[in-house]
């Protein structure tokens, strides 16, 4: 018989992580986050609970959300079994913290972070657990010192788990957060890993703790550095245009969004990552030599920042 996994320990860590992150950014913004705790109704396909923490029209964050969810379902959705076909049809349990912050100032980058555990319950009683997560930075206007800082903190968070982890997960992030239909990166990357089980339960859990705990250190100094930079309508317009790429990626390519929607997840929480103001234009290109053009030439192409 398999030893039960200490999922209560994972849950306690994730709830504490959500509390710490929200407290730090509430203090920075000066606006309280709304707290929306929820429990799935007994007749719903997914069972479980969670808590969405959200700020809209804040002083610094135009829209930002930090979700915790813990759900159980009768069958893993297709997005979770494409790399593990032997688990198709298994009941599952998933829990995680996921956040996206969209700052008001166009010079302050959008950021995403997620840490999660997924466990499948096989018919023979074995429980197969794996971990995923990471963080990535999506600027409208690029600054080398911001990208270097963010990537250095990511590298330091993974250092205790082997020298191979950062280059591997950095490349994985560059490849994952890529809009294939645009042939364009979403941002300047960071780290990303999924279906991670090679270090066992304790090793995988330790790694998501290290990544989750590093988030505020990775992003807060950048937000503080850029939040008061003067800007005008030109910068806001370009920010809204670039946010369109964010929407396209999340709705077309993101496995987390697809997992939530395919498994019958809570739509308001899943789509909390959407930016508040977005624009699209037909076949638009920035003028060469402008700060907007530099995003495409100097920042979106994958490169080693540290």
Image (spheres, rainbow, N blue to C red):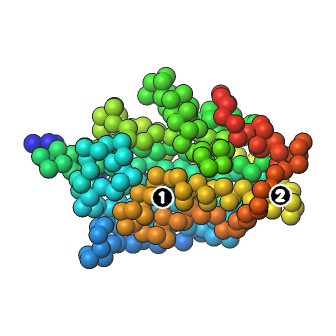
Residue in the foreground of this view, choosing between 229 and 191: 191
Which residue position holds label 1? 257
Residue depicted at x 66% and y 41%: 188
Label 2 secondary element: helix
Q: Is residue 84 above or below residue 111?
A: above
Relative to 196, is 6 on the left or the right?
left
Q: Position of residue 274 (x, y in %)?
A: 59, 64
Relative to 180, is 222 on the left or the right?
right
Q: Is residue 28 above or below residue 171?
A: below
Outermost residue to the top: 163
Label 1 secondary element: helix
Q: Quadrant of the C terminus?
A: top right
Residue in the foreground of this view, choosing between 182 and 107: 182
Which residue position holds label 2? 235
The tag on residue 57 is none
Could you give the CA–CA distance between mark 2 and mark 1, rounded to whole angstroms?
29 Å
Taking the image as drawn, is residue 64 in sight?
Answer: no
Query: On the image, which quarter does residue 276 sit in?
Result: bottom right
Residue depicted at x 48% and y 58%: 257
Q: Is residue 63 above or below residue 230?
A: below
Residue depicted at x 67% and y 31%: 303
Relative to 234, is 214 on the left or the right?
left
Residue in the foreground of this view, choosing between 289 and 196: 289
Residue in the foreground of this view, choosing between 258 and 190: 258
Q: Earlier in the sequence, mark 2 or mark 1?
A: 2
Relative to 295, is 151 on the left or the right?
left
| Mark 1 residue crowding within 10 angstroms, few (<14) / some (14–19) / many (20+) | many
- Tell whether label 1 touches label 2 (CB within 8 Å): no
Residue depicted at x 54% and y 71%: 34
Q: Quadrant of the N terminus?
A: top left
Q: Position of residue 182 (x, y in %)?
A: 66, 49
Q: Position of residue 229 (x, y in %)?
A: 83, 54
């Amino acid at each position: 018989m398999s030893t039960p996994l200490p999922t209560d320990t994972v849950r306690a860590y994730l709830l504490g992580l959500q509390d710490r992150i929200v407290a730090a950014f509430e203090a920075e913004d000066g606006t309280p986050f709304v707290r929306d705790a929820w429990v799935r109704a007994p007749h719903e396909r997914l069972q479980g609970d969670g808590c969405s923490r959200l700020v809209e029209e804040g002083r610094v964050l135009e829209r930002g959300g930090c979700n915790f969810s813990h759900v159980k379902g009768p069958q893993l959705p297709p997005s979770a079994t494409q790399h593990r076909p032997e688990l198709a049809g298994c009941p599952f349990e998933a829990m995680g913290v996921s956040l996206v912050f969209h700052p008001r100032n166009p010079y302050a980058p959008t950021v995403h972070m997620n840490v999660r555990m997924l466990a499948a319950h096989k018919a023979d009683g074995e429980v197969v657990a794996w971990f995923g997560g990471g963080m990535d930075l999506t600027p409208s206007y690029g600054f080398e010192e911001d990208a270097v800082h963010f990537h250095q903190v990511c590298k330091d968070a993974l250092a205790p788990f082997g020298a191979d982890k950062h280059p591997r997960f950095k490349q994985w992030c560059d490849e994952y957060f890529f809009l294939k239909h645009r042939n364009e990166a979403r941002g300047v990357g960071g780290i990303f890993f999924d279906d991670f089980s090679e270090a066992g339960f304790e090793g995988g859990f330790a790694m998501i703790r290290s990544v989750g705990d590093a988030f505020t250190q990775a992003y807060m100094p950048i937000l503080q550095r850029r939040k008061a930079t003067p800007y005008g309508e030109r910068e806001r317009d370009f920010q809204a245009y670039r946010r369109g790429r964010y929407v396209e990626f999340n709705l077309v390519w993101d496995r987390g969004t697809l997992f939530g929607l395919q498994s019958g997840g809570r739509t308001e929480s899943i789509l909390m990552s959407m930016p508040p103001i977005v624009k699209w234009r037909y076949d638009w290109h920035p003028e060469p030599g402008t700060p907007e053009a530099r995003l495409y030439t100097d920042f979106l192409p994958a490169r080693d920042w540290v």
